[in-house]
Image (cartoon, helix red, strand yellow):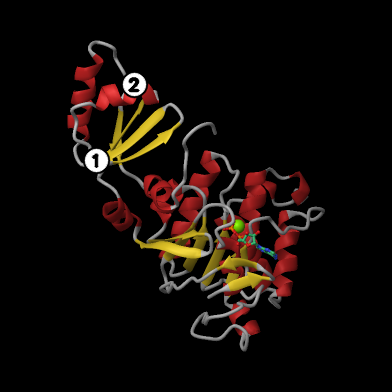
Amino acid sequence: MRKCFGERTAVAGIDLVVPRGRCFGLLGPNGAGKTTTLRMIYGATVPSGGWLEVFGMDIRKHRRHVRARLGVTLQDNVLIEALSAVDNLRVFGRYHLIREPDLSERVEELIGFLQLGSHRDVAVGNLSGGFQRRLAIALSLMNRPELLILDEPTTGLDPAVRLALWSKIRELRAGGTTVLITTHYMDEAERLCDEVAILSEGRMIAQGAPSELIETTLARETVEFDCSTEEEAQLLEGFTLAAYRLRAGGRLILHLEDAGALVAHIRNRDRGHHRLCVVRPTNLEDVFLRLTGASLEGDL
Ligand SMILES: Nc1ncnc2c1ncn2[C@@H]1O[C@H](COP(=O)(O)OP(=O)(O)O)[C@@H](O)[C@H]1O
Ligand SMILES: [Mg+2]
């Protein structure tokens, strides 16, 4: 698919298949084209070129059919602030032409599923960000979608709420729902997604299972430590480093197969000065920074 807005190209060319029943992540820096890609998939904007099928149908010809089978949570919550959580759900249910007694049943089911019970009658404008987000997701589940599209569902949420949402997303996926999600949190993508695609400037630059991408992009282990540019040469002298390095201000991040050897080397060169070296497995965030060519040199 491609999408241009006048002169501006938002999606230069994205080619992907999201298998049914999987959780698929679209990753990429701000402006990479994630939201635009989702908008084309749920029929909010028409591709400028290419070919797109949802549930095996052309969304332009079968818009209502397709929309009835998918649920969307946008980057910004679309809630009626003056109404309670329950009433928001009821309004949305009627939009989907769900009638009583199914409507009440469905509302209670979702209140229970997203643990909104304690705040069910509070006007949405008075709910915390976490509750609003949960309600927004509940709304997108009103029609029991086969495909759930979540645009940055956990941005700005506290860690406990993120954890709770992850478990709900996993439950949905386990129940057979296909989940298409965008996120800036690589730990989230690594935990939730069966497969991810990394976008940059409207193009896909990598695709695969998180573990597969880590394995094929970078060495297995990562060492992080503080060291100035001047210290670096002295510290690493004599160590053959066929590893990718990233400098973020005063911090050096190195990916290599044998972290232990490097740490021993640094200890040796440091002569008594105890520098804290963090050794950890290489993760999706490292891959993301490597592939999107993020430059962290200098001041941030
Ligand atoms: N309606 C629009 N009109 C003009 N430019 C747009 C529009 N929507 C998105 N863009 C541009 O397309 C690019 C991709 O945007 P978007 O898909 O929102 O990226 P992301 O969600 O990855 O941050 C950006 O440069 C953005 O400014
Ligand atoms: Mg976006």
Residue farthest toward the bottom in the current orientation of the protein: 61
- The residue type indicated by label 1 comes to Leu
Q: Secondary structure at mark 1?
A: strand
The residue that appears at 57% across and 62% down in the rendered structure is 33
Q: Nearer the viewer, residue 292 or 285?
A: 292
**155 to the left or right of 82:** left
Which quarter holds ligand 1?
bottom right
**Placement of 206 over or under 232, stated as above or below:** below
Where is residue 201 shown, x and y percent of the image? 53, 60
Where is residue 150 shown, x and y percent of the image? 56, 61
For residue 256, which numbered disc appears in the image? 1
Where is residue 280 shown, x and y percent of the image? 30, 36
For residue 78, which numbered disc appears in the image? none
**122 to the left or right of 3:** right
Residue farthest toward the top in the current orientation of the protein: 272
**64 to the left or right of 88:** left
**297 to the left or right of 62:** left
Q: Badge 2 local density, few (<14 within 10 Å), some, or many (20+)? A: few
Residue identifier under label 2: 231
